[in-house]
Amino acid sequence: MNAWNHYWYGPVAAIRPYLLMKCFLILLALDLSAVRLKAAYWYGLADFNVAHFRWLDAFQPRLSSAGFVAICLLASLLAFICAFGKVNRGLLAILFTIYTLTWATSMLDLFQHHYFLSIVLGCLIFFPSIHAGKFRTSTAEGSDGQQTVLTSAWAFRLLALSIGIVYAYTTIAKLNGDWLSGATLQRFVTLEKVEPIANLIGRVGLPQDSVWQMLAVGTIFLEIPLAAGYFLAACWDQRPTRLVHVPYVVLWLMALALHGGIEIVGLPIGWFSYYMIALASVYFLSPRLLERVARPIIGLLAEVLSRLQQLSESLTGRQQVFGLLVAVVGLIAVLALTGWAVDLPGSVDTFLLLGLALIAWTAICLVRGQARSAYPVILQAMIAGILVYVATGTSRTQYEYYLGLAHEHHRLGGYAESTLGFEKARQYTRGSRETARIEYFLARSWYARGDNDAALRHLEASLHHHAEDYEAIYLRGLARLATKKVDLALVDFERTLQLEPDWPVALAQTARLLVAHPNPQLRDVQRGLALAAQADRLALGRSIDAVETLAIAYAANDDSERAVQTAERAIALARRSGRNERAEQILKLLEQYKRTQRTGSP
Amino acid sequence: MSASTSLLFDAPVGRRRTFVNGFLVVFILVQLLLPLRYYSGAAQDDPRFSWRMFADPPLYSIEVHTTVEQEGRLTEKAVDLQASLPSRWQRTLRRRHLPLAAEKLMRWCCQKDNAVRVRLMSDRVLDQGQRVPKLRLSMDCESLEAVAIGPMQ
């Protein structure tokens, strides 16, 4: 029992849980605003969703993109507020619940890292409440100016054990032939990312191909000691000798190598590496070093908090009420403005909802005679609002959100929504290439809506920024064809093929036009057949358009037998992919070809 | 405690410590046992909560057919999932064998096509392109209950 008590309740350098709380929450707030929000457009699309748990699926309301934006923004704002202020377990519990909802609410996001972050947040709720001022006072009072402030923090140790369990299981998961041979890694990482290491291996006389195997096995060799290190982390604060420092510094370097390496090779795992490096720093570096590094920030924070406290204490009676009124009006103005500037669906509502909750809380403080405690929280909420706006703006959250949303609506046939999305994304474009692409996307969506004039206007704008964009030229050809400018359309299709000779879509379209050109002098059925055959070959026989065009080209070349066979192939292809209406259309062509085959005349 | 240290907070004592001890045991047990659901094979196609990062999940094919009433006749047609389902969901359904997701997809098809019955077929696609039947479900769109009509592996 003694060992148990010693492990969980023994003293820990207070700087560790203090820094972990601050660093983790700031990282989480930024992650939510700068990364998670970008994918918010997937939520509620086509009204389809599956939650991670059956009970949640039955219980939660219909998910929408605005709803997901709201929970991400709210979690981000709360994380900032918690990071800048005193530990408030109630607020942390709310943050834990809202954050957990961001991943549990839908299987769209299957990254296990989110689940891990929920575990961290769950532990943070029970972290000791440490005030920044404690470090300032203690270091000043210490005889050598280097006093270590200790605390009892079972939740901090529980988190260390949890991280150890995660490392242990990730190691177990890698103990299979596929991983150990390097095959799994090869599927996720491109060779050019590991080229410097491969070259290094080549220089010492080993085959360069062994780089995958070495990296895979090396990962396991880094993860095993890290798991063990976390199981024992923070126990060393009880006897902080120099000898104990060394293995922990080695562990920190191992964590840096593992997670820094993951970032260098570009594995798509969001900000997980940064979280893990921050955690390793807090658990493995010496408390003295942590205090030395964090002292300027902690000092500043303590100074701001004490000044704010002095200011609020200097106000009395009516001044107190008036001061709070000014602060609340300021808060609502800042939150409304930043919510509007964030410019995502539901952002204004979310910011104002938080503002209203804080007003209610301020009123409760006022009634209880604790008006002074409201000032820091109001200030934290204002800073949080501004930081969320800065994080979304600098990471281009809005651009990627609206662009992704517009693309997916376009794919699903929601062309009006896609036009709106592209219009919004255009507000956040940077550089002429990006503008050219957005103009092209807008043209594509107007073309799909049947407004060829609008499409042509956007295409001119696109080609003004990027004259050799083959997709834009091809689309201009289609829009010109739709407006009966057949000769100009052919010029565009030919130009497209000059720029992109192996594009099956353009090959098929040019072939169609060539075999049925209204001008007999420009009609070329033989070249049309050759282009159609090339399109079908390049599309590996999987494109309904290419196969249908080939059937048309055979028919134009009076080869009704092959026209029938190819049309039958197109119908089978359309039916297999569930495109029944398309199959019906081709069926009409097939009947026509069969008639021609029987009678000899079309 | 040495002279150069100061203790901010004491460890919990009495009933509070008993409660914390209980919480610690439950928390650790959940973390140790939850991943075993995947590693023991009980949910071998669902690596969620198992800490299996960078897994290369198997590929599944998904085909859905709806039976709709047209002019008094019942006709069955294939659902064009590529054109109607968001691409990220298509990827999730093809990469994970998740019976709950399959059920939800069938309900969604019931509503979308105003169908009478929905049939779902999911095969595991092997490297060489061969298919191994994995899931065969049928759903009556009135009761919205899925019934297995084939292999459930």
Image (cartoon, coloured by chain):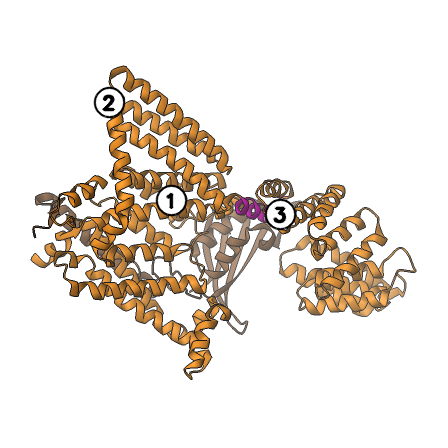
Look at the image and tell me in which quarter the C terminus of chain A lies: bottom right
Q: Amino acid at mark 2?
A: Ser
A539 in relation to A380, above or below: below
Residue located beneath label 3 in the image? A410
Image label count: 3
User: Mark 3, mark 1: which one is toward the viewer?
Assistant: 1
Badge 1: chain ID: A
Chain rendered orange: A
Q: Position of residue A460 (x, y in %)?
A: 74, 47
Q: Position of residue B98 (x, y in %)?
A: 43, 57
Q: Position of residue A120 (x, y in %)?
A: 29, 50
- Residue stretch rendered in magenta on the structure: A399-414
Residue located beneath label 2 in the image? A314
Please name the residue shown 45% across and 47% down the image.
A34
Q: Left or right: A159 with respect to B59?
A: left
Q: Secondary structure at mark 2?
A: helix
Q: Left or right: A564 with respect to A99?
A: right
- Disc 1 versus disc 2: distance between alpha carbons? 33 Å
Is residue A286 found inside the magenta-colored segment of the image?
no
Badge 3: chain ID: A
Badge 2: chain ID: A
User: Mark 1, mark 2: which one is toward the viewer?
Assistant: 2
Please name the residue shown 90% across and 63% down the image.
A601
Q: Mark 1: give few (<14), some (14-19) or many (20+) Cα within 10 Å.
A: many
Look at the image and tell me in which quarter the N terminus of chain A lies: bottom left
Q: Amino acid at mark 1?
A: Ala
Q: Left or right: A287 with respect to A416?
A: left
Figure quadrant of residue B31: bottom left
Q: Are discs 2 and 3 both within one chain? A: yes
